[in-house]
Image (tube, rainbow, N blue to C red):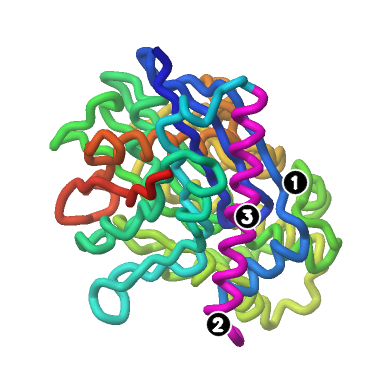
Amino acid sequence: MRDLYVGLMSGTSLDGADGVLVDFSGTGPVVLRHAYRPFPSAFAAELLALNSAGPDELHRSALAANGLVRIYADVVAELLEKTGSPAATVRAVGAHGQTLRHRPQEFDGTGYTLQLNNPALLAELCGIDVVADFRSRDVAAGGQGAPLVPAFHREFFGRAGTSVSVLNIGGISNLSVLRNAQTGTATDPVIGFDCGPGNALMDHWCRAHRSQPFDELGAWAASGSVCQPLFDALMAEPYLAKAPPKSTGRDLFNPAWLQERLQGFDAVQPVDVQATLCAFSAGAIASCVAQYATETRLLIVCGGGALNTELMRRLQEALPGLVVQSSLSHGLPPMQVEAAAFAWLARKAVLGETASLESVTGAKGARILGAVYPR
């Protein structure tokens, strides 16, 4: 009998929503179908604007949440239609939502994390139970609430008795270091954390100077030259030297942050800034791997950054002792990994099983993540 869950993901790249239908009835999760809906440009611009303080935020956020969920519902409908799966056969939908603020442990010691979502509406539209709000319980337990995918990385990509690292490159990059990967022990815990920017700054610069949502295959960056003084200024960001557990997002790595660091570099051509931003993303990742994954010889890359040929080339160049490969070579295409992780997280919530790793988030202990909205 099939054990079906849907996972949905829309990340910091703000390009669209990915969804997968996953069967957990076998020895490991099997993705039956992937679907994708791009965000309309005006909607993506509104999501980006809501990442910063602005007028009438509560009203705009509520309407944007409804719009996001309708896109999610379209993705779910396609998954069901293309696989011939009635809604009643799917146990739950894991819907992460769109992160607008992520400030754990700040302000009052607890801080908060805020994902734009309307899971009640999604349950109504799909006729399927929805699991949402995955990060808040970990934050309440003193953790970072992110990244949440290392536990899934361990289950899907882990290899007993050896170390593997998994790198997700969305708008922000995050690294999972899977030591003694399939089990993880007190002496060999899984660690995971946000390295720094992935695609977010490159995408912003590409939109600003080429009116394109992203630099396809990294071709524009590859045509430029790295400005070493600017690269050094970017790499001086204090977050990069901070020890894990740690997490970040557009609250830090945003256009205002970049504009501040570009002061004094007016003579650098836009194409060379793009090349430098690509080198910066690769350099921030490589420094994390070199410091925290010294035993790793394989780096599996997923997320949109795995499709950026120039970024992948720079990663391999910066990490000559490792094999850097797309997750496609290891059973799951790059754009399906995070969505599959949220299907897995939804299943863990439904089963009442813990899904967080205290060695990753720094919480007081493992917690059951997510709130269930019945259909």
Q: Are marks 2 and 3 in contact (CB under 8 Å)?
A: no
Q: Dot 1: within a 10 Å radius of its alpha carbon, few (fewer than 14), some, or many (20 or more) residues?
A: many
From what the image shows, is residue 375 above or below residue 296? below
Q: Which residues are magenta?
A: 53-82
- Res 291 visible: no
Q: Dot 2: within a 10 Å radius of its alpha carbon, few (fewer than 14), some, or many (20 or more) residues?
A: few
Residue type at numbered disc 1: Gly
Q: Residue furthest bottom?
A: 55
Identify the mark at residue 53; answer none if there is no mark.
2
Ranked by sequence position, the earlier of labels 2 and 3 is 3
Residue type at numbered disc 3: Ser
Residue at the image position 21 percent from the left and 48 percent from the top? 367
From the top left corner, tell me how far across and down residue 170 is, in percent.
57, 49
Q: Is residue 307 magenta?
A: no
Give 191 or 28, whichever is nearer the viewer: 28
- Res 307 visible: yes
Mainly helix, strand or loop, the magenta region?
Answer: helix
